[in-house]
């Protein structure tokens, strides 16, 4: 084999790479057909949680409301907190697709292992916020610790 530039491609490493791909695909197919469940990380205990509602406010802002007290804990001004807005837009879209209302609050949870998750009990969907980096997770951590009325 050779490439268009006239360089020779070694056959043995190429065959080895091909064999590795075939073996990997065969192993995955065998596990799937055998019904072996995928490995998962056991859940870590929740150390702190907060129920939250998100409501559109005048002028394009968003009010974040404590789910237990019903009081506003913070206001997201237009053009700020893009990660929070995008995450919530995705979760709300899923509720709309499933024709669910806004009655159930979202649940923001801090775990003993340091993870921060946002769950939607209405849809069963959960987002591991740490997967999006510390700055983005920090935006939600701020909501977990925010005092009412900000």
Image: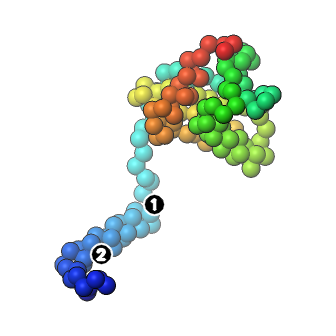
Q: Quadrant of residue 121?
A: top right
Q: Is residue 140 visible?
A: yes
Q: Quadrant of residue 17?
A: bottom left
Quarter of the image with the N terminus is bottom left
CA distance separating discs 1 and 2? 26 Å
Picture coordinates of residue 95 (x, y %)? 72, 43
Residue found at x 55% / y 22%: 142
Picture coordinates of residue 68 (x, y %)? 70, 18
Picture coordinates of residue 125 (x, y %)? 61, 42
- Circle 2 packing at 10 Å, graded few (<14), some (14-19), many (20+), is few
Which disc, if any, is residue 18?
2
Residue found at x 33% / y 73%: 22
Secondary element at image label 1: loop
The residue identified by callout 1 is 35
- Circle 1 packing at 10 Å, graded few (<14), some (14-19), many (20+), is few
Q: Give left or right: position of 17 versus 97.
A: left
Q: Looking at the image, which is closer to me, 45 or 1?
A: 1
Quarter of the image with the C terminus is top right
Q: Quadrant of residue 24?
A: bottom left
Q: Are marks 1 and 2 in contact (CB under 8 Å)?
A: no
Residue found at x 65% / y 44%: 90
Q: How is the rendered protein coloured?
A: rainbow
Q: Looking at the image, which is closer to me, 110 or 6?
A: 6
Q: Is residue 66 visible?
A: no
Residue that sits furthest to the front in the current view: 5
Which disc, if any, is residue 109?
none
Residue found at x 61% / y 39%: 87
Secondary element at image label 2: helix
């Amino acid at each position: 084999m050779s490439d268009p530039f006239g360089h020779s491609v070694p056959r043995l490493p190429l065959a080895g790479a091909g064999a590795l791909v075939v073996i990997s695909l065969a192993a995955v197919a065998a596990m799937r057909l055998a019904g072996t469940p995928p490995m998962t990380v056991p859940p870590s205990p929740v150390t702190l949680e907060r129920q939250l509602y998100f409501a559109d406010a005048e002028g394009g802002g968003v009010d974040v409301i404590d789910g237990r007290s019903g009081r506003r804990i913070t206001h997201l001004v237009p053009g700020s907190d893009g990660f929070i807005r995008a995450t919530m837009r995705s979760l709300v879209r899923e509720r709309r697709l499933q024709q669910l209302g806004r009655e159930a609050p979202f649940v923001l949870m801090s775990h003993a292992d340091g993870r921060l998750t946002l769950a939607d009990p209405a849809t069963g969907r959960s987002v591991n916020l740490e997967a999006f980096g510390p700055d983005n997770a920090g935006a939600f951590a701020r909501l977990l610790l925010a005092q009412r009325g900000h």
